[in-house]
Image: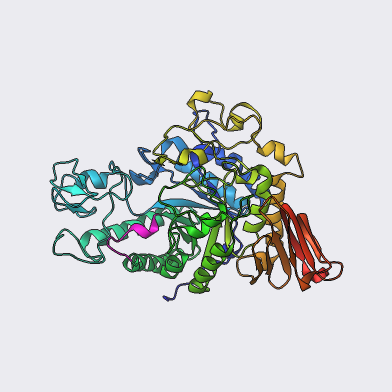
Amino acid sequence: MTSFRPAPAWLSDAVFYQIYPQSFADSDGDGIGDFNGITAHLDHLAWLGVNAVWINPCFTSPFRDAGYDVSDYLSLAPRYGTDADLAELVQEAGRRGIRVLLDLVAGHTSDRHPWFTASADDPDDHRYIWAPEGGPDGFVRSPGSRPGAYLPNFFDSQPALNFGYAHLDPAEPWRQTVDAEGPRANRAALRDIMDHWLRLGLAGFRVDMAHSLVKDDPDRGATAAVWTELRGWLDSAHPDAVLLSEWGDPAVSVPAGFHADFFLQFGGPTNGGPLRSLWNNGEGTADEGWDPLGCFFDPGGQGSPRTFVEAWRAAQEAVGDAGHISLPTSNHDFSRLNCGPRTAEQLPAAFAFQLTWPTLPAIYYGEEIGMRYVPGLPDTEGSVLGPRYNRAGSRTPMQWDDGANAGFSTAPADRLYLPVDPDPLRPSVAAQRADGTSLLHLVHRLIALRKATPELGPDGSVEVLHSGYPFVYVRGGRHLVVINPRSTPAAFTSRLVDGAGPQALEAKGVEADSGVVTARGFGYGVFDLRSA
């Protein structure tokens, strides 16, 4: 493994919060969220206890893929605000102990980026991947005077930047090595982009499709080498900054140079199996190509935590002390926890697990109050990826209060980026803040418990006592955690709970004494074994 500078100390204590800026808070009444809206709600995040925020792409874009089609990496999309607005957000967040990360789209640009429009008219430009007319399947015909076709990275409007090919092929003479002029220029551009924003006080980047740079790279070794080079530069130029990858395979991405990687709905040897085995109930965003997996957090009790635990152990062995694995509740591309038949009463057990397992937790905006995936929304900025995969349902406006537009915006309802959840019983921050028994207060308490208890963080040990219902494990040799996501009771016998039993630090529906752990449906508990 390549030797890197150790990760900044703050990362081990991080509780991430993902903000989809279009939908978080609108400060100017145009129906779209913005930087000033985020700044106005930083006290909510500080109270909740999160200390690191990453914001989905906010750069200039035609928004054919919700900002993941960047047309200028060094300017901000006007709908979000100005450089000064972002600077104020970073400053005010810092005053509250919150670091801010941006989203870096490394593998492609918009087809309206000046780099691409120039390349489409210049046969000697190699910033993108071009093939002769009638190239392989998947190439898109040139829109300019240059003959041939270009390779997109996702949608056709997102031409792939050229980072070279891991393998050359005489039948495809347009392939270039990773050290050709175009790939070298693109690596330099990534350094320049990161340097520009880090000098303004940002704490790092979450990198979109980080695995996608070098083509014909089945083991991702050549792509990993690119990130190893960039991490070396980052360690020298910005040693306190971090890189989080959208890779979905921590065993590969973290040794390559990322400080952390997420378990995602895709990626790794089983195409996202570990995360989907926890949360995916087949509703909301569902890919037709996914293998059916029993969902552990399902009332029917047909799943198992083993798929996740085994994948986590394998990844952790490969990662070692080089970085971290992050576990999200959901994200802008994947169903929220509250999706389909899953009800609000099932969410506390999910958070009790996520905030006590040895990973970096990443909370998607609104999950802390149990916002639901809203079905049936129109395609919005490229949200629809398949007949059952509409990402818009996970991107609806944050629900701040019971006022107009749920407190998200003063704009007319028909001008909102997406409609507010129409359910009259939708949760809100204001209502749950006033209710000490709410999910919001539970998440707040669990984060505080995690911060006060190093054994519950990513570096504490974990011993799994029972991989079923209930899921039972011990953190740091001291804290017993019991999770029962099914609707029916479950029990487990353990010598650790002899006698009167340990002290409950946070529990509902779980009792531990006389050698038996008993969990009612959807029960959860965190106990201090030293008090037993």
Q: Position of residue 52 (x, y in %)?
A: 57, 54
Q: Is residue 155 left or right of residue 379?
A: left
What is the residue that sits farthest to the right in this orientation? 500
Residue 279 magenta: no
Report the quarter where the C terminus lies: bottom right
Residue 213 magenta: yes
Relative to 25, is 315 above or below?
A: below
Q: Which residues are magenta?
A: 209-218
Give the residue displayed 54% in from the left and 57% down from the top.
277
Q: Position of residue 513 (x, y in %)?
A: 83, 65
Q: How many marks?
A: 0
Give the residue displayed 72% in from the left and 44% down from the top.
438
Q: Nearer the viewer, residue 59 or 469?
A: 469
Q: Is residue 221 visible?
A: yes
Relative to 113, is 183 above or below?
A: below
Report the quarter where the N terminus lies: bottom left
Name the main secondary structure of what is drawn in magenta.
Answer: loop
